[in-house]
Amino acid sequence: MSTPTTSQRLEEENRRYRGTGGISQKNRGSGFVPAFIDRDTGRTEVSRFATGAPAPVHMLCGLPEDWVLARDDTDTVVAVKASVVAGFLREGRFYTREQAVRALAH
C-alpha cells in the first residue's frame, strides 16, 4: 500500500533536492510554479494557501477536497492521497522535481 503525501514528505523532498532546481527557491526564476499532480487522474493543481491564493512553495492546505485524506484538530490538511505528487507547472506542463532538475541542467 502506498504512503499518503504529508507535510513531512514534502520536507524530506526539500532536503533531498536542496541546492537544485527541484525546489521552488531554485527554479522560480525559470518559470516553474509549485504544483501537484494526481497520478491516478492526471489532474494538476497549482499550490495554494488555504485562502486560494497561489503559494510560493508546496502547500497541502489548498488542494482539492477530494484529494484530502486527513485533517488535524485545527482543520489543517495533514495528508493527501498517495497518488498526489509534488512538482511544478511550467508553460502548462507538469514536471516532477527530478524532471525540473534535468530541465534546468540543459
Image (tube, helix red, strand yellow):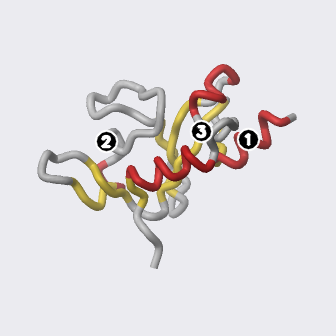
> The residue under label 3 is which amino acid type?
Phe
The tag earlier along the polypeptide, 3 or 1, is 3
Per the model, the C-alpha gap separating discs 3 and 1 is 11 Å
- Residue shown at 34% from the left, 46% from the top: 64
The tag earlier along the polypeptide, 1 or 2, is 2
Mark 2: give few (<14), some (14-19) or many (20+) Cα within 10 Å: many
Q: Which residue is mark 3?
A: 88
Reply above or below: 74 against 6.
above
Q: Secondary structure at mark 3?
A: strand
- Residue shown at 25% from the left, 59% from the top: 70
Per the model, the C-alpha gap separating discs 2 and 3 is 17 Å
Q: Position of residue 74 (x, y in %)?
A: 13, 45
Quarter of the image for residue 27 reads top right
Report the mark closest to the observer, 3 or 1: 1
Reply above or below: 80 against 53.
below
Q: State the quadrant of the N terminus.
A: bottom left
Q: Position of residue 53 (x, y in %)?
A: 35, 25
Q: Which mark is residue 101?
A: 1
Answer whether labels 2 and 3 touch (C-beta < 8 Å): no
Query: Which is more toward the observer, 16 or 77?
Result: 16
Q: Which residue is mark 2?
A: 61
Mark 3: give few (<14), some (14-19) or many (20+) Cα within 10 Å: many
Task: Please state if 54 lies on the left or on the right of 90 as rendered.
Answer: left
- Residue shown at 47% from the left, 49% from the top: 10
Q: Position of residue 76 (x, y in %)?
A: 22, 45
